[in-house]
Image (cartoon, helix red, strand yellow):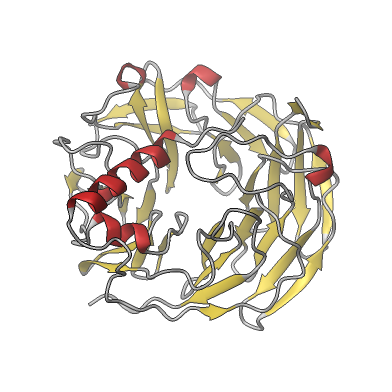
Amino acid sequence: MIPLPRAVVATLAVLLVAGCASGTDPTDPPARQVEWTAMAESPLGSRGGVLSAWTGEELLLLGGSTSRPCPPGADCVGPSAEQLLTDGAAYDPDTDMWRALADAPQTLQWAVATWTGAELVVVVPALDTEVVQPAATLAYDVAADTWRALPAGPAEFYGRGVWNGSELFFPISETTYGADWALDPATGRWRELSADPFGGSFDRSFTWVDDRFLVTGLPMSDVGGSDGAPYQLAQYRPDTDTWARLPPTAVGFWDPTWFLADGRLVNVRQDAYTAGSDLSLSPGGQLDLATGVWSPVPQTELSGQELYLGCQLPAVGPAGDWIGGGGPILVSLDPPTTTFVDNCAGLTEPQLAVWTGSEILMWGGPDAGYETYLNQGDRWTPPPPS
């Protein structure tokens, strides 16, 4: 069974309360329009759970399954072996054309994919339930359109991989699951990282800054809390495998999505996504790495139901003047402002989104009735901040 993540539950709860309390018709959209342009028709069939990556030139889509979408708040059975897919395709936004990719050597369900600048490294977990899938680490060479096998990862669960130029680092979301690991894709060597100094943490995130990682995590003692807690902050140096604690953040519960932007560690969460109404912490924040000073990030003035009707983009990170942390709001730190992303054309809830540097590309997701997945994509160039 696949439960809805607690962050999504908290988001939906707050948005529904805001919509009921406003006294306005929740079907009235904000008075803003976004011109989405359809991407060329994809050669891939309808699917969910697709692995994706932006190479700097192409959007890569790999694998997934043909299982039915799981509606919000529902418990759903995972895909069967017959529903898992191994094919893939690449989209070039300059030509608006797709090309087929070599099939993956095996299924990639619940895998983690990271682009290194030359290869897409995919870490696949072992499944031994209704679906049997061996653990594997695979590297896809885009130029040669070939796959190679690396030693399987030594752990069962990994978070999003982070590339520092020589190794891939895989933080775990919660320290009760085990240790963090690093992989050298050139040699296939895995190494275990020393434990962070938080003494047990969850909602952890690694952000690469120059020659070190900035690591955030919430203390395990705050699991289940509703009135907020600051993220703990530490520095990890991979060359010495050592940690140093830093002053805690000014950012509270439920959004472990952090980015590096203009010399700042940034969390762009908005008010509507906070876990409760009595938070004393900032709903988003930025740390100036040169001065060590925390300050707020710009917040939207839109109501909860307006945000609910916007384009529910996945986190797309920083590019140009904007940062997208997930949901319908893009944030600019300089000038300090936000912009609303209107309903996503024909995509109810896009499955994936990437920045190209000037455009947002989004693809897939469920149809409006959660009957099947879509296999279409759209693109949009955000206006400059004002």
Point out the image quarter for the C terminus.
Answer: bottom left
Residue beneath the point at 26% across and 49% down? 272
Vertical placement of residue 358 versus 196, above or below: below
Q: Quadrant of residue 337?
A: bottom left
Vertical placement of residue 107 versus 386, above or below: above
Residue 163 x, y percent position in the rendering: 56, 47
Judge by depth and name the residue closer to the eye, 186 or 308: 308
Q: Is residue 225 visible?
A: yes
Residue beneath the point at 42% across and 64% down? 311
Judge by depth and name the residue closer to the eye, 149 or 204: 204
Q: Looking at the image, how many numbered discs can be counted on the residues?
A: 0
Residue 99 x, y percent position in the rendering: 77, 72
Q: Is residue 271 visible?
A: no
Please indicate whether residue 18 sits to the left or right of residue 148 in the image.
left
Point out the image quarter for the N terminus.
Answer: top right
Please indicate whether residue 259 sits to the left or right of residue 115 in the image.
left
Please indicate whether residue 283 sits to the left or right of residue 241 in the image.
left
Residue beneath the point at 47% across and 55% down? 314
Q: Which residue reaches farthest bottom?
A: 95
Residue 339 x, y percent position in the rendering: 29, 69
Judge by depth and name the residue closer to the eye, 277 or 76: 76
Q: Quadrant of residue 6?
A: top left
Residue 146 x, y percent position in the rendering: 84, 56
Residue beneath the point at 27% across and 42% down? 274
Q: Quadrant of residue 207?
A: top left
Vertical placement of residue 229 versus 327, above or below: above
